[in-house]
Image: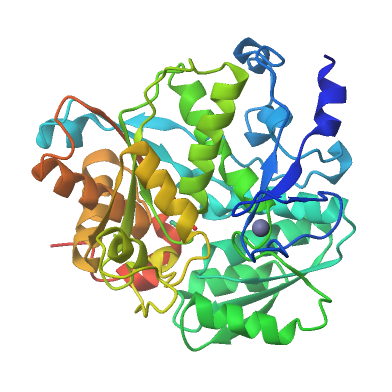
Amino acid sequence: MNVAITSSLLGDLHCSQCGKTYDPFSRQTVSRCCQAPLLCDYVLDVGSVLPGDLASRPKSLWRYEELLPGIQPENRVSLGEGFTPILTLNRLASQNNLQHLLLKDEGLNPTGSFKARGLSMAISKAKENGEQACIIPTAGNAGVAMAAYCARAGMEAVVVMPRHTPDAFKEACRAYNARLIEVDGLINDCAANVQEINQSGAYFDVSTLKEPYRLEGKKTMGFEIAEQLAWQLPDVIVYPTGGGTGLIGIWKAFDEMQSLGWLPQEVTLPRMVAVQAESCCPIVTTWQGKQLNSKQYVGRPTLANGLAVPRPIGEPLILSVLLESGGTAIAVSDEEMVKGVRELARYEGIFGAPEGGAVWAATKKLLEQGWIQPNERVLLLNTGSGQSYLDNLKGKLTD
Ligand SMILES: *Cc1c(COP(=O)(O)O)cnc(C)c1O
Ligand SMILES: [Zn+2]
C-alpha cells in the first residue's frame, strides 16, 4: 500500500482502560468512559515501512512519520527534537565492573530536556486541530517546552509551575512570552489550579496523558534506541519516572516495531526500570505492595523536579510495563542522585539533570543487589540538562 494513503488512516484513539474508540480529529483529553488516558492506534502491516527506508530521512523524531499521528507537514512545529546520541560510558563501566553501559543523552534536545519530543507532537496536533491557546501544569521542563513550541506555532501559552522550581525554568517561560503562574505545592496542585482557571475550556490542556499526543512524541525514544543500536535492544533500560509517559511510550514503540516486523516476534524485550526519588515515589510504593494505588499518595519536593509527581494518572499503564517487561521500581535519595550527577560529569563529561543522576545511582544499587548482571547491556536515560538545575545543585558539585 502507498505510504501516504496509509498515513491518513493512522492515529485512531482508544481508551486505555476499556478500549472504546474516539475521534482523533477533534479536541480530546482523557476518555469520557473511564477518565483514562487515550492511546493512538496505527495500521501496521509487516513490510509497509522498512528500516532501510529510514536511512535518508531527517535526523529528528519526524523520521518515523508513519508511526506518528497524521499531521500535515505545514502544521508540524519542530525545533529539531529527537535523534539524540547514545553514548558508551566506558570509564564508569570499568569502575563499576559493568561490561556494556550506554546512555542516551536527552539533555541535548531543544529546551534542554526530552519534554521537547512530547510537546513538539502535542502542539503540532493542537495546531492541526485549530487550537489557539494552551495551558499546562508542570514540574518545570514540560512548561518550558510547551512555551517554546507555542511561541513557534504563534499560539498563546499559560504555564502553571510550583513556586520552588529553579529560576532557569521560569525565566525560559518568560522569554518565550508564556504567562507564568506560580503555585505553592507540587504538580498535582498546579493541575488543580489549571482546572480552576480553565473551567470554560478556552485553553487546550496539555497535561501529561490527559492529551494523547505527548506520549506519541516521547515514544520515539524507543524507535531511536532500536535503530541506533542496529536493532539489538539492550537487556535493561533505566528510566526516571514521574508521570511515566516516557516509560509507557518506549514500551509502546517496541510493540509497534514488532507489529511492523522491525523487531523479530520472538525478540526478548528489555527489562524496564522505573527510578523515583525517595521523597516522592508513588510507583515504588505501589510496586512494593505498600499501597493499593497512589490516588492518596502524598509526595514532597526533590532536587529532581521532574520526579515530583505524587499521583500519576498513568499509574496502571506504568505498572503493566514493569510487569510485562520483568522490570522493577526503585527509589534513590537526593544525596545519591547528586552523587550520580557528579560521577556522570567528572568521569564521562555529561552534565545531566538530577533525574539522570538518579538513574545512574539506581543502576549501581541494582548491580549491587544482583538484579543487574555485570555482563548485561544497560541503557540509561539522561532526560535533561544539568544547566537548568543550577539553583538545586549549587554548592553540591564539589567535594
Ligand atoms: C518530566 C521529566 C521526567 C519524568 O518523565 P515522565 O515521562 O513524565 O515520567 C524525568 N526527567 C526529566 C528531566 C523530566 O523533565
Ligand atoms: Zn473506557
Comparing 377 with 310, the one in front is 310
Q: Is residue 45 left or right of residue 186?
A: right
x%, y% of residue 47? 67, 11
Q: Is residue 122 above or below residue 42?
A: below
Q: Is residue 57 left or right of residue 387?
A: right
Residue 324 point in image, percent of width and height: 39, 39
320 w.r.t. 34: above or below: above
Q: Nearest the camera: 275 or 286?
A: 286
Q: Quadrant of the N terminus?
A: top right
Q: Is residue 87 in view?
A: yes
Determine which quarter of the picture holds residue 279.
bottom left
Q: Which residue is nearer to you in this view: 44 or 62?
A: 44
Where does the image place residue 38, in percent across and percent down from the top left?
66, 54
Is residue 244 in sight in this rendering?
no
Query: Which quadrant does the C terminus fall into?
Result: bottom left
Query: In this figure, what is the number of numbered marks?
Result: 0
- Image-quarter location of ligand 2: bottom right
Q: Pinpoint residue 219: horizontal percent, then vertical percent.
A: 56, 41
The residue lying at 51 percent from left, 75 percent from top is: 187
Left or right: where 362 falls relative to 143: left
Where, by quadrant of the figure, is residue 137 drawn? bottom right
